[in-house]
Amino acid sequence: MQRTSTKLVTLALAAVAAALFTVHGALAQTTAAAAPPPGDTARGKANFLRYGCYECHGTVGQGNYGSGAKLAPHPPPWTTVSAYVRKPAGNMPSFSEKILPTSDLADIYAYLSSIPAGKAYTQIPILNATTMKPK
């Protein structure tokens, strides 16, 4: 009898895991497909500073050890960012639509998307000159 119940529990857990993977896959496809609303990069930079995002995420979204995630360059998908801003996990405060309108958030996202990646250390002369080269 115990073997039968163990098999049933195992089967049930496998079914739940399969369902979770299916839902996760569907959500990931939906998230990747949603395009961000149009935004203005200049207003986005001003909003990033005005709403205090820079305090944890740095002035160019580079992140801060322990307090704010790296957001730029290459921010997460729009739907991920907007959902997280509205209902965050961890220490980040939530920003409702009344506090941070979606239009302002779209501008912030446009700003983060506009931030270019930094140069490779090999393209920075002072770093390239002082970096130890392999023998």
Image (cartoon, helix red, strand yellow):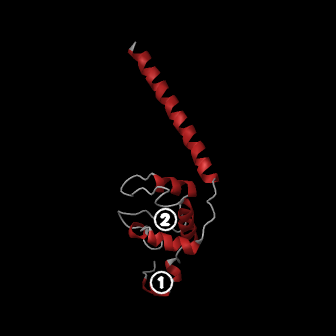
x%, y% of residue 118?
52, 76
Say whether marks 1 and 2 touch (CB < 8 Å).
no
Please name the amino acid that badge 1 sits on.
Asn
Q: Quadrant of residue 38?
A: bottom right
Q: Residue at x 45, y 80 (%)?
A: 133
Crowd around label 1: few <14 · some 14–19 · many ≥20 (10 Å): few
Crowd around label 2: few <14 · some 14–19 · many ≥20 (10 Å): some
Whether residue 11 is visible here, answered yes or no, is: yes
Residue identifier under label 2 = 71
- Residue lying at the far top in this picture: please name it: 1
Is residue 134 depicted above or below 80 in this figure?
below
Position of the N terminus, as image quadrant, is top left
Q: Residue at x 62, y 61 (%)?
A: 37
Q: Residue at x 44, y 67 (%)?
A: 51
Q: Please tell me which of labels 1 and 2 falls first in the chain.
A: 2
Residue identifier under label 1 = 128
x%, y% of residue 102?
55, 59
Q: Decide which of 100, 2 is in the foreground and name it.
A: 100
Mark 2: which secondary structure?
loop
Position of the C terminus, as image quadrant, is bottom left
As measured in the structure, the alpha-carbon distance from the residue carrying label 1 to the one carrying label 2 is: 27 Å
x%, y% of residue 15?
52, 29
Q: Decide which of 79, 15 is in the foreground and name it.
A: 79
Please name the amino acid that badge 2 sits on.
Leu
Q: What is the total number of numbered labels drawn onto the structure image?
A: 2
Q: Residue at x 46, y 65 (%)?
A: 70
Q: Quadrant of residue 130?
A: bottom left
Whether residue 77 is visible here, answered yes or no, is: no
